[in-house]
Amino acid sequence: MNFIKSVFLILFMILFISCSNNKNDSEKFDIVPVDSTKSFAVLGYCVPAPENSMNVKYAIVNKTIAESNFDYNNINYYYRASKNLDELLVFYNNLKEYKKNTDEELNIEIIIQTNDKNEYIAYWNVDGIYYSLYSKEDKDIDDLSFILMRNKAL
């Protein structure tokens, strides 16, 4: 009987520790869904989904990041903005440079990085606000990041 109690206690402790670790990971990001881009007014920057997007969802993350999640040309994207680049890059691990593009007319550089999971993140700065675009596919991230950057810069 003691053996069964010991095994039960050990299993309970493992389950408790596992749940505690998962809770800490999920608490890393405080995600508050919002109804529209109007809710981003409190932040002072906005990330509207591009025209013709589908399945659009908006959120404020960690009280400082404006986020839109949408499908565009059958690819899912996360478009985010923050005053702090590190806040945007914290979502990704093991980033390495993939390529850089520069809009010659506006003199704005878009940096695209990838990671071990073959995920892609493009980011740029317009008027002191950092923007990022994330996708699991490389297919249209160049073109869409240029469109989104120019929408902010012009």
Image (cartoon, rainbow, N blue to C red):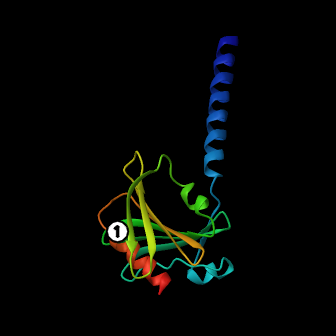
104 and 30: which one is in front? 104
* Amino acid of disc 1: Asp
Up/down of 22 relative to 146, above or below: above
What residue is at 60 percent from the left and 58 percent from the top? Answer: 86
Which quarter of the picture shows residue 134? Answer: bottom left
Whether 16 is drawn above or below 116: the answer is above
Task: Examine the image and state in which quarter residue 64 appears.
Answer: bottom right
Whether residue 115 is visible here, answered yes or no, is yes
Left or right of 6? Residue 107 is left
From the viewer's side, name the closer residue of 90 and 62.
Answer: 90
Quarter of the picture containing the N terminus is top right
- Residue 1 appearing in the image: no
Residue drawn where x is 50% and y is 48% of the image: 93
Pick out the residue farthest to the bottom: 154
Q: Residue at x 67, y 34 (%)?
A: 16
Q: Is residue 9 above or below residue 60?
A: above
Question: Outermost residue, top direction?
Answer: 2
Label 1 CA crowd tier, 10 Å (few <14, some 14–19, many 20+): some
Secondary element at image label 1: helix
Q: Give the labeled residue for mark 1.
A: 142
Which quadrant of the figure has residue 77? bottom left
Left or right of 98 in this view: 22 = right
Q: Is residue 108 above or below residue 153?
A: above
x and y, in percent, of residue 49 in the image: 45, 78
x%, y% of residue 89? 54, 57
Residue 24: horizontal and vertical position, in percent? 66, 45
Residue drawn 56% across the image and 81% down it: 37
